[in-house]
Image (cartoon, rainbow, N blue to C red):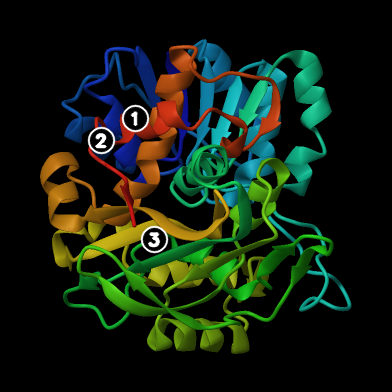
Amino acid sequence: MKVLLVGVGGVGEAIAALVKPRAWMEQMVLCDYNLKRAEEVQKKLGGDAARFPVEFIDASRQEMVEELARKYSVDLIMNAVDPIFNETIFDAAFNVGVTYMDMAMTLSKPHPTDPFHKTGVKLGDYQFEKSKDWEKKGLLALVGIGVEPGMVDVFARYAQDHLFDEIEEMGIRDGANLTIEGYEFAPNFSIWTTIEECLNPPVIWEEGKGWFTTEPFSEPEVFDFPEGIGPIEVVNVEHEEVLLVPRWVKTKRMTFKYGLGDQFIGVLKTLHMLGLDNKEKINVKGVQVAPRDVVAACLPDPAHLGDKMSGKTCAGLWVKGTKDGKKKEVYLYQVADNAECMSRLGCQAVVAQTAFSAVIAMDLLDHKQWGGAGVLGPEAFEPTVFMEKMADYGFPYGIR
């Protein structure tokens, strides 16, 4: 397989590190706006310029994405940049005629008059509206194949197929006990994406009602996370799984809840109050700049925080329903330990955990264990072949 990797930040680096020992990966082109960053990752991978060539890319320029995909005759374009560029890269893959994958779908736009009750443009709407075009061309766009969304969506399909007769409710529950030494505030993932998903109105799905929204940080509950992480308060956050899972899995309710903590929520609310969450460019003394990009530039790069981090992060799916006439409740999860991820991959836990599902998906596509045409989520595929590979890639799942 030959892959154009668009974006070599923390997650992009982890994807490259995970594919390095895999013989089926013939070539992965490391593309980034920051050429020095791409060269840094290439060096970490052993300096193999033939197997991991480096290219400058501006992900906002569709013609540049297409040109590089054709130059290297790639089989797949892997989108590992902030989702503001998703439409461009998605359309580039369609025009070139290659498989497309991302870890977050195209962006939403809140309802113009009633944002905390009604959906506007939903996550992924742009992509799903073009699914028929992809089907006609016999092309596959596998969207939302990170850890959340991604792995947990595979869990949802597995729960439906193997664990339950009827599902009453499903919910992603994400929590961590990670700490970062030396910083009062340092997100362990892209702050651009974090602001987007945490400050937009969260989406909930209910049978008979469909998708609707609520206020940010609503429905707080305490969830007890496994492997020593313990009880953490989680709240509703906008996330792709709620838009993906009900398309393929039958459940009466679907939510996504994230353990953010009071300090993190307070910072996000302050950024919103000051307008610093704005992703549209404004004029600052003659310079056009997006306030959110300024915030991101002021904070440490999550890709370089691994040696200052300690603790574990847990991503998982909680399911409640019935099996053989009896009530049943399970939590399917994956816990990544930062020390182990740094030792094995040289990447911090959050980005490593986000990356492995994309690599497993590439593996399954290359070996014809997954396949299809159109715009499909991870739920559309057979789940056990994915779950069987998780331990082999160093990210075994657990079930409680």
Residue corresponding to mark 1: 388
In this rendering, is residue 219 above or below 53?
below
Q: Secondary structure at mark 3?
A: loop
Residue corresponding to mark 2: 391
Q: Amino acid at mark 1?
A: Glu
Q: Residue at x 67, y 72 (%)?
A: 283
Reading the chain from its start, which is encountered first: label 3 or label 1?
Answer: 3
Q: Residue at x 19, y 40 (%)?
A: 345
- Counting from the top left corner in percent of width and height, residue 374 is at 72, 26
- Counting from the top left corner in percent of width and height, residue 67 is at 59, 20
Reading the chain from its start, which is encountered first: label 2 or label 3?
Answer: 3
Q: Amino acid at mark 3?
A: Phe
Q: Residue at x 47, y 89 (%)?
A: 266
Q: Secondary structure at mark 2?
A: loop
- Counting from the top left corner in percent of width and height, residue 184 is at 27, 83
Quarter of the picture holding the C terminus? bottom left
- Counting from the top left corner in percent of width and height, residue 135 is at 77, 20
Quarter of the picture holding the N terminus? top left
Q: Badge 3: few (under 14), some or many (20 or more) residues near its Cα, within 10 Å?
A: some
Q: Badge 2: few (under 14), some or many (20 or more) residues near its Cα, within 10 Å?
A: few
| Residue 117 seen from this side | yes
Give whichever of 79, 65 is nearer the camera: 79
Work out which residue is located at the far right of the displayed protein and give it.
Answer: 113
The label on residue 189 is: 3
